[in-house]
């Protein structure tokens, strides 16, 4: 990659944080041998050991309590289970009519091809976005779980092997209704409760055409948060597309002056050029991509340095395989990946899995709570200790839940 003066400045910014989120990887981790496009192509999964077909017999959506599960069965009795995000409540007809039929009857070992096929199936490409890719992701997770169990391998081994056994999190606050002072207290509480060495807070009003949620809140927070939290914590700010480029750059300058380490989604998600302008202007890393469902546009963002840190969502962008393609493209350009985390279900676990096998994953990953509940679905249980969560190491996605657990679940699809 071209490690520009801008990216070099970002990677060496902020003493103590220099390795935390520089957009430019250290020289020894940069991969200059293939183009960004080439990096995103080719085989992803390592399925050695699976020498016989694993024909998909059925895929069901089941509800138990407030959770939705995808249960996949093969014709020879193998099973895989995944957890959806909360959008299953209203996306289930798409799952039922436009996604599941593309997978049933097929050999699960051809999963990569099936993910490509479902994009064209029934002209699904016409409705591409998270409404399509979330259901695809849930099915993909479930099939990966089945493949991992059949091969006796944890998920990371299907993606080339585990690089990390525990993942450091950043505690993300979604508040916009709090005052600056209240939000500082919230962030301090998150740090105290989780041991996290990184936090994220919201700025702007969310896709709000430069309006703040409370007038003056964002500037107030940006000016105070570093002073209040100290230098040992990485601090990220997320605008959810609140600003045009000029306003984002103005707030970004304030962030530069007050020790903010990352500026996420400064402009609306599809304002690719404007976001690039912000990234070009600022010395702190600009992050984005959580709403992006197109690998082609991810390629543009990466090749054109539209962002410094790439943030595919494992659900919204269609699963681990597509996110791995984004990560490989980012690596070819020397960029880090910090996936966005889908709320509800086991979104934080998917992120942890992904970070466990992705060489250019960032140092801290999004966490919005829930290890207390879903952590018990794993053995050993997932625990958030000293700001880190252990990566599940049983085969597949690592859950202990089996089809027996879902016996009394309500069948939705
Ligand atoms: Mg965000």
Image (tube, rainbow, N blue to C red):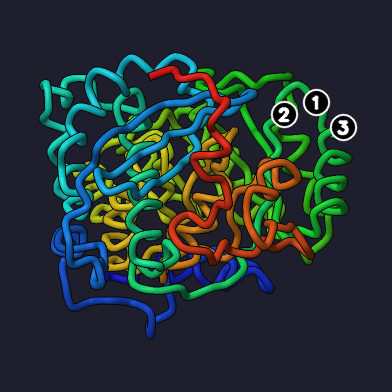
Between residue 383 and residue 274, name the one nearer to us.
383
Check residue 175 in the rendering and tell me which mark sits there, or answer none. Answer: 2
Report the Cα–Cα distance between label 1 and label 3: 6 Å
Q: Kindly tell me whether mark 1's CB lies below 8 Å from ligand 1.
A: no
In this picture, residue 253 sits left or right of residue 380: left
Q: Dot 3 corresponds to which residue? A: 182
Q: Residue 101 appears at what percent x and percent y?
A: 20, 27
Label 1 close to label 3 by CB (< 8 Å): yes
Residue beneath the point at 29% across and 33% down? 58
Residue beneath the point at 23% across and 44% down? 295
SS category of the residue bearing label 1: loop
Circle 3 residues within 10 Å: few <14, some 14–19, many ≥20: few
Between residue 53 and residue 224, name the one nearer to us.
53
SS category of the residue bearing label 2: loop
| Lower sequence index among marks 2 and 3 | 2
Q: Dot 1 corresponds to which residue? A: 178
Report the Cα–Cα distance between label 1 and label 2: 6 Å
Label 1 close to label 2 by CB (< 8 Å): yes
Residue 317 visible here:
no
Residue beneath the point at 22% across and 52% down? 54
Report the Cα–Cα distance between label 2 and label 3: 10 Å
In this picture, residue 308 sits left or right of residue 297: right
Circle 2 residues within 10 Å: few <14, some 14–19, many ≥20: some
Q: Residue 62 appears at what percent x and percent y?
A: 48, 26
In this picture, residue 180 sits left or right of residue 97: right
Q: Residue 28 appears at what percent x and percent y?
A: 38, 85
Q: Is residue 152 above or below residue 65?
A: below
Residue beneath the point at 42% across and 56% down? 308
Check residue 250 in the rendering and tell me which mark sits there, or answer none. Answer: none
């Amino acid at each position: 990659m071209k490690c520009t003066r801008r990216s070099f400045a970002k990677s060496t910014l902020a003493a103590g944080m220099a390795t935390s989120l520089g957009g430019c990887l250290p020289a020894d981790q940069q991969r200059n041998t293939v183009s960004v496009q080439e990096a995103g192509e080719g085989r992803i999964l390592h399925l050695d050991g699976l020498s016989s077909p694993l024909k998909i017999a059925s895929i069901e959506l089941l509800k138990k309590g407030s959770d939705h599960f995808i249960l996949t069965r093969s014709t020879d009795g193998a099973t895989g289970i995944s957890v959806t995000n909360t959008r299953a409540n209203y996306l289930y007809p798409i799952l039922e009519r436009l996604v599941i039929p593309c997978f049933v009857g097929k050999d699960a070992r051809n999963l990569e091809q099936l993910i490509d096929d479902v994009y064209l199936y029934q002209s699904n490409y016409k409705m591409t976005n998270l409404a399509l890719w979330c259901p695809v992701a849930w099915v993909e997770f479930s099939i990966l779980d089945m493949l991992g169990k059949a091969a006796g391998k944890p998920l990371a081994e299907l993606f080339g092997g585990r690089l990390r056994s525990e993942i450091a999190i950043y505690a993300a606050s979604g508040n916009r209704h709090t005052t600056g002072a209240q939000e500082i207290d919230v962030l301090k509480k998150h740090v105290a409760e989780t041991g996290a060495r990184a936090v994220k807070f919201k700025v702007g009003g969310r896709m709000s055409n430069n309006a703040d949620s409370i007038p003056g809140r964002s500037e107030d927070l940006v000016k105070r948060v570093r002073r209040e939290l100290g230098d040992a914590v990485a601090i990220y700010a997320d605008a959810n597309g609140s600003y045009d480029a000029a306003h984002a750059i103005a707030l970004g300058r304030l962030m530069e002056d007050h020790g903010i380490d990352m500026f996420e989604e400064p402009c609306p998600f599809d304002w690719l050029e404007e976001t690039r302008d912000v990234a070009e202007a600022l010395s702190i890393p600009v992050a984005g991509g959580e709403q992006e469902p197109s690998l082609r546009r991810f390629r543009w963002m990466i090749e054109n340095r539209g962002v410094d840190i790439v943030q595919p969502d494992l659900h919204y962008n269609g699963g681990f395989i597509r996110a791995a393609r984004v990560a490989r493209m980012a690596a070819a350009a020397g960029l880090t990946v910090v996936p966005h985390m889908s709320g509800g279900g086991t979104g934080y676990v998917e992120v942890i899995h992904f970070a466990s096998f992705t060489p250019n994953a960032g140092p801290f990953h999004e966490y919005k709570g829930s290890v207390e509940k879903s952590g018990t679905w794993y053995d050993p249980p997932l625990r958030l200790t000293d700001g880190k969560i252990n990566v599940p190491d049983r085969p597949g996605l690592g859950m202990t839940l089996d089809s027996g657990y879902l016996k009394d679940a309500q069948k939705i699809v």
